[in-house]
């Protein structure tokens, strides 16, 4: 492979995919974009009733390997509309109330997008001796309407989902910035693995399932459903993890990870050691830089759903370091993106049909 594995078509897809809204429970339009890009590189697709999409290479093979990311992004729901037309919200996933004030929003209705803003009192009017921080109790959306009836005429009702419109940009040549890099970068990276396998004419002697799961942000639900459908033998999951080098993060409790220093390989009870060793050995052999992280109980990613399914599936987690998680300016380094792709690609090539990862074989 050449030094840079991302081409113009890849980056065009990434931008289109990121700019499309795919909130938890409403991922299907993004999944259609993802599947259309993946189509030349797989033999067939599997989908389920909640929107998880799976591209499959060698669907008739008995031994099944999963590479996985998740497709959904955090968002808000309309929860209450006041008589004077202001909208109060609840979370759909881990949306951050502290970044909401002064943000533009898209309210998704059957009539299309309705624009609004998270309003906030001007600095001149606030009580300086007792300033209140943003909270779920006091953030609100203003659509420019004077009454509840005006809001409802726009098609807005309780249960409408709300996303931010922030779009993809590149900072300083090699930093990708957007909302929802967590974890549509994962869907992008596993799609690139499939592309490389096709373009390099790699022949696999097992079935490869490229899984873009839904509903991770509210409890790993999409992965929990699809793993029982696929019943894989092995799973390699990719998600994001925190860059801990920015201000106000304590490394003693959060560990050290930095964008630009390589993918992060996880240590946790759900991580199967022999599979992790295969990935580390591969990275060292191929001179792919990497970092390490430990989780005391759960990884908090779809790795946990795969690992503890079907009697136990050997699973590993390769994470992409990211700054400012669950904000609209999530940031990753292009080099890390490429190295995650390389690490998954090279690790897949090391797996053999029927390979056992049991500690007792």
Image (spheres, grey):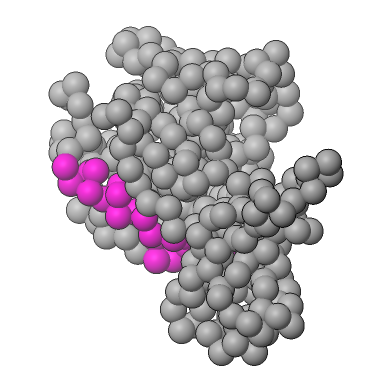
Q: Is residue 162 left or right of residue 296?
A: left
Residue 194 is situated, as x and y percent measured from the top left of the image, at 28, 42
User: In the current view of this chain or complex, which residue is farthest to the front?
Assistant: 124
Q: Main secondary structure of the magenta part?
A: helix
Res. 58 visible in picture: no
Q: Residue at x 44, y 78 (%)?
A: 112
Write down the quadrant of residue 255 in the picture. top right
Q: Residue at x 56, y 28 (%)?
A: 242
In the picture, the quarter occupied by the N terminus is: top left
Residue 146 is situated, as x and y percent measured from the top left of the image, at 63, 82
Residue 240 is situated, as x and y percent measured from the top left of the image, at 51, 34
Q: Is residue 100 left or right of residue 11?
A: right
Q: Which residues are magenta?
A: 8-30
Q: Residue at x 61, y 52 (%)?
A: 100
Viewer-closest of 35 and 75: 75
Write down the quadrant of residue 359 in the picture. top right
Q: Is residue 329 left or right of residue 206?
A: right
Residue 177 is situated, as x and y percent measured from the top left of the image, at 39, 39
Viewer-closest of 74 and 162: 162
Q: Is residue 169 left or right of residue 228?
A: left
Q: Residue at x 74, y 51 (%)?
A: 126
Viewer-closest of 54 and 207: 54
Write down the quadrant of residue 263 in the picture. top left
307 over 294 or under it: above or below: below
In the picture, the quarter occupied by the C terminus is: top right
Viewer-closest of 24 and 163: 163
Is residue 144 part of the magenta span, yes or no? no
């Amino acid at each position: 492979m050449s030094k840079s594995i991302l081409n113009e078509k890849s980056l065009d897809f990434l931008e289109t995919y990121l700019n499309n809204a795919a909130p938890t429970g409403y991922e299907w339009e993004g999944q259609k974009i993802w599947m259309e890009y993946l189509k030349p590189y797989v033999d067939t697709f599997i989908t389920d009733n909640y929107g998880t999409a799976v591209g499959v290479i060698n669907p008739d093979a008995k031994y099944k390997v999963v590479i996985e990311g998740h497709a959904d992004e955090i968002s808000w729901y309309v929860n209450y509309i006041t008589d004077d037309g202001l909208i109060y919200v609840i979370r759909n996933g881990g949306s951050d109330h502290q970044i909401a004030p002064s943000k533009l929003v898209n309210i998704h209705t059957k009539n299309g997008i309705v624009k609004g803003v998270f309003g906030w009192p001007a600095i001149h009017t606030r009580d300086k001796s007792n300033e209140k921080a943003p909270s779920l109790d006091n953030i609100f959306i203003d659509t420019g309407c004077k009454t509840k009836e005006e809001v409802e005429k726009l098609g807005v009702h309780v249960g409408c989902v709300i996303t931010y419109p922030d779009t993809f940009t590149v900072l300083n040549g090699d930093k990708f910035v957007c909302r929802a890099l967590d974890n549509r970068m994962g869907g992008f990276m596993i799609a690139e693995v499939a592309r490389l396998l096709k373009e390099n004419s790699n022949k696999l002697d097992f079935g490869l399932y490229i899984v873009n799961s839904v509903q991770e942000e509210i409890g790993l639900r999409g992965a929990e459903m699809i793993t029982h459908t696929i019943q894989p033998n092995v799973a390699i999951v990719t998600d994001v993890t925190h860059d801990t080098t920015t201000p106000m993060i304590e490394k003693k409790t959060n560990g050290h990870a930095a964008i630009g220093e390589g993918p992060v390989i996880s240590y946790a009870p759900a991580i199967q050691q022999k599979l992790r060793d295969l990935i580390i050995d591969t990275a060292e052999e191929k001179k792919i830089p990497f970092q390490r992280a430990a989780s005391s109980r759960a990884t908090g990613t779809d790795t946990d759903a795969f690992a503890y399914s079907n009697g136990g599936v050997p699973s590993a987690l390769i994470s992409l370091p990211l700054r400012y998680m669950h904000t609209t300016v999530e940031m990753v380094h292009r080099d890390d993106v490429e190295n995650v792709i390389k690490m998954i690609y090279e690790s897949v090539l090391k797996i053999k049909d029927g390979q056992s990862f049991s500690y007792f074989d």
